[in-house]
Amino acid sequence: MGFFLETLFGGLMAGMLYSLIALGFVLIYKASGVFNFAQGAMVLFAALAMSRFAEWIPQWLGFESLLLANLLAFIAAMAVMVVLAWAIERLCLSKLVNQEGITLLMATLGIAYFLDGFGQTLFGSDIYNINVGMPKDPAFILEGMFEGGVMISKEDLVAAAIAALLVVVLALFFQKTKTGRALRAVADDHQAAQSIGIPLNKIWVIVWSVAGFAALVAGIIWGSKLGVQFTLSLVALKALPVVILGGLTSVPGAIIGGLIIGVGEKLSEIYLGPMLGGGIEIWFAYVLALGFLLVRPQGLFGEKIIDRV
Amino acid sequence: MLYRENGQFKTSYAADQQIFPIFQERWAMALLLLVAFVVLPLVGSEYWFRAILIPFLILSLAALGLNILVGYCGQISLGTGAFMAVGAYAAYNFMVRIDGMPLIVAMLLGGLSATVIGVLFGIPSLRIKGLYLAVATLAAQFFTDWAFLRIGWFTNNSSSGSVSMARLDVFGVPIESPVTKYLFVLTVVCVFALMAKNLVRSAIGRQWMAIRDMDVAAAVIGIRPMYAKLSAFAVSSFIVGVAGVLWAFIHLGAWEPAAFSIDRSFQLLFMVIIGGLGSIAGAFLGAGFIVLLPLALDQIPHLLGIPLSTATITHLVHMIFGALIVFFLIVEPHGLAKLWSVGKQKLRLWPFPH
């Protein structure tokens, strides 16, 4: 039982990180109808920027404080993501308005490739680490119930707390601010939003910046856990089944989908893996999503698609 | 001045339905085939065959298969590498497990196995489209990656996970030297290109295009979406599977699942987009471009005396591909093939303005 709970917690934590990446997908899809394949590349790009700035800024300015370095690096990385969002909107999306979804999907695939190359040319292609002072030692809970208790990593707990905080902040931003209201209006109906005077271009830059922010947070957490390297942008492919499962247009769906995928992956690896030869983590999420697509294409929380195929 | 169709009258239906209706085009094509079949084998060096021509031809074939699905039928696929892998491993198993299995039969059987898997993963396309289908085909990609790595039966329980194919022959002629390999690949590619060209201008090709342009309208005029979509998946994965067999047997010789990873799928999709969605010539142009660009980036700075590290080149290639994808989608969604036909159109008037 203790082992089962440990696996469960491990899965929940991994799932939380998937949800963070999936969140970026959902935000952009909701606001602009673009299925953003580049979210993974954005996570890598943001993480690279963060880790390199944290290294460079103290060198440029000549101070030692880790906290200050991280703070400045975070601001600098965020600025880079905003510039990136602006460039993507200006150079790519604004020219592809009213194209079919499939064209936009391929365009974001191109952006993803570009960012992979660009980020690594700019910031280097070694493995870097991000040190934001996350606690590394494990904690034991429920020691009264089981022998030895259940081991969970404090780092994961902090990560989960940050992710939850991010979701709350985003929810508040979307529900309570004027910009958030404009974003929701655009998500509902582009034309109607435009006709009441909401500037679409500006909204898209904001949405991509917010997605960049989500990418930065996801990148920092993943990066401090696993190191910043190219595989980060592949891990992000896991977010695709998450959004399919949760529903493309639902923020809570991204969170719950991520948790389900994370837990399902870990549990199936432990309990089904030995029967199938191991390593089923690679495809479990996708096959689950595929099954979902056949039965309930809109996902758990998505809006029902009324679209004859 | 040279490229004109005036004076060339069509007097029969057969003449009206030719693939190359203009006399000059037929000659150009014949010349191209002559160069490919006769001149290149005489003058080409081993490096040309191994590094450029054979990969170019095989990837063109795979891009051709993918173009049928994406360009003609409008169903996006990110699992092309998987279907190539299915073809390669199936053909390998037919060769290993059945004594005296001829290469061509094994190749076609490999293609058929890819067809079965392709149709299986194409079934979701009946309920979903676009973005959702991309995820379904990604599932195929990751699942086959895993299956060929972990299930020993597929690799004949090879301990290293890598399998190899040696001593190939066709009708008693050994396919050993680069020239024979090249000629074999070229023949297969020509046959399939001709087949594909005829398929897309026949009734079934028109059905695919109707589904691509507007599926509801197509259904209204009596095209069965299920039949059209699944047949596109079948034909596409058959060709892709055959390309996979060639890639594994002829180009690589010994291979492991990583040869058909998701990068391969993306690479093929890029060929189709850059070359031209919905065009047979586009598959060749795109493949040529994507095979040659990294080589050019490797050679040109070298010649100019600017040494670039391999890592920088890889990143540059990524950046250029990414930027080109976006560029082509914005400026010319029909890719290099469209530029080619625009050029031909201009040539018809040249040098007079009207």
Image (spheres, rainbow, N blue to C red):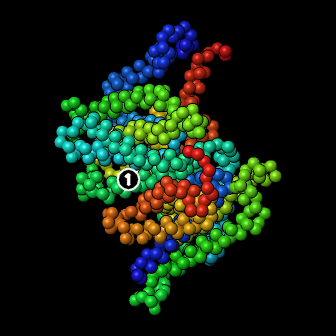
- Is the residue B188 above or below the residue A261 in the image? above
Q: Give the quadrant of the N terminus of chain B.
A: top right
Q: Where, by quadrant of the figure, is residue A96 drawn?
A: top right
Q: How many marks?
A: 1
Residue A215 as seen in the image, left or right of residue A265: right
Residue B220 as seen in the image, left or right of residue B120: right
Residue B36 as seen in the image, left or right of residue B136: left
Neighbour tally class for label 1: few under 14, some 14-19, many 20 plus, Cα within 10 Å: many
Q: Where is residue A20 in the image (x, y as percent from the top left)?
A: 58, 66
- Can residue A239 be seen from the camera position used here? no
Q: Residue at x 39, y 23 (%)?
A: B33
Q: Nearer the viewer, residue A8 or A288?
A: A288
Q: Give the quadrant of the C terminus of chain B.
A: top right
User: Given the current orientation, which residue lies at the most extreme left position?
Assistant: B99
Q: Nearer the viewer, residue A80 or A141?
A: A141
Q: Position of residue A40 (x, y in %)?
A: 54, 58
Q: Residue at x 42, y 78 (%)?
A: A4
Residue A160 as seen in the image, left or right of residue B230: right
Q: Where, by quadrant of the figure, is residue A52 drawn?
A: bottom right
Disc 1 designates what residue? B144
Q: Residue at x 48, y 37 (%)?
A: B228
User: Given the current orientation, which residue lies at the most extreme bottom position?
Assistant: A144
Q: Where is residue A67 in the image (x, y as percent from the top left)?
A: 62, 76
